[in-house]
Amino acid sequence: MQADVDAWLARALAAHLGHYRDSAAREAAAGLLTPSVLAHAALLAELGRLVPGADVDQLAFAGRLTTTEPEAAGALAVFLARVRS
C-alpha cells in the first residue's frame, strides 16, 4: 500500500494537483517526503514535459526506477531538465 501512496504523492507533486497546487506546499514537501518520492515526482514532471499527452500508466516505469535507484532517477530528471534548457 505504501508504494501506491508514494506514487500518488509523486503524481500530485509532479502535476501540481490538490495540496501541491500551492508553491509553498511544494517547497515544504522537499523536507517531508522521502528521496524516492521526490525523485519520482521530478522524473514524472520532466517526462510529462517531454511527452505532454503521456498517460500515468505509460509512465509506471518511473516509479519502479525510483524505488530501486532513487539517486539515479533523480539524476535522470536533472539531465532531462538540462536537455530542455
Image (spheres, helix red, strand yellow):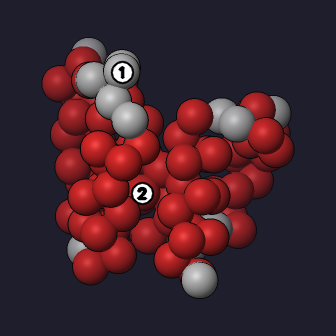
Q: Quadrant of residue 62?
A: bottom left
Give the vertical position of 42 relative to 45 (above or below). below
Residue at position x 29%, y 44% in the image: 58
Residue 60 % position (x, y): 33, 56
Q: Any mark on residue 31, and which?
A: none
- CA gap between label 1 and label 2 equals 18 Å
Res 71 visible: no
Give the vertical position of 42 relative to 36 (above or below). above
Give the vertical position of 28 relative to 71 (above or below). above
Residue at position x 51%, y 77% in the image: 3
Amino acid type, residue under disc 1 in the picture: Gly
Res 64 visible: yes
Q: Which residue is mark 1?
A: 53
* Structural crowding at the residue carrying mark 1, measured as other residues with C-alpha within 10 Å and reported as few (<14), some (14–19) or many (≥20): few
Residue 42 % position (x, y): 43, 46
Answer yes or no: do the residues labelled 1 and 2 have beta carbons within 8 Å? no
Residue at position x 36%, y 48% in the image: 57
* Frontmost residue, 82 versus 34: 34
Residue 82 appears left or right of 43: left
* Frontmost residue, 36 versus 1: 1
Q: Which residue is mark 2?
A: 40
Q: Quadrant of residue 51?
A: top left
Residue 66 % position (x, y): 33, 67
Residue at position x 75%, y 53% in the image: 28
Amino acid type, residue under disc 2 in the picture: His
Q: Quadrant of the N terminus?
A: bottom right
| Secondary structure state at the residue bearing disc 1 | loop
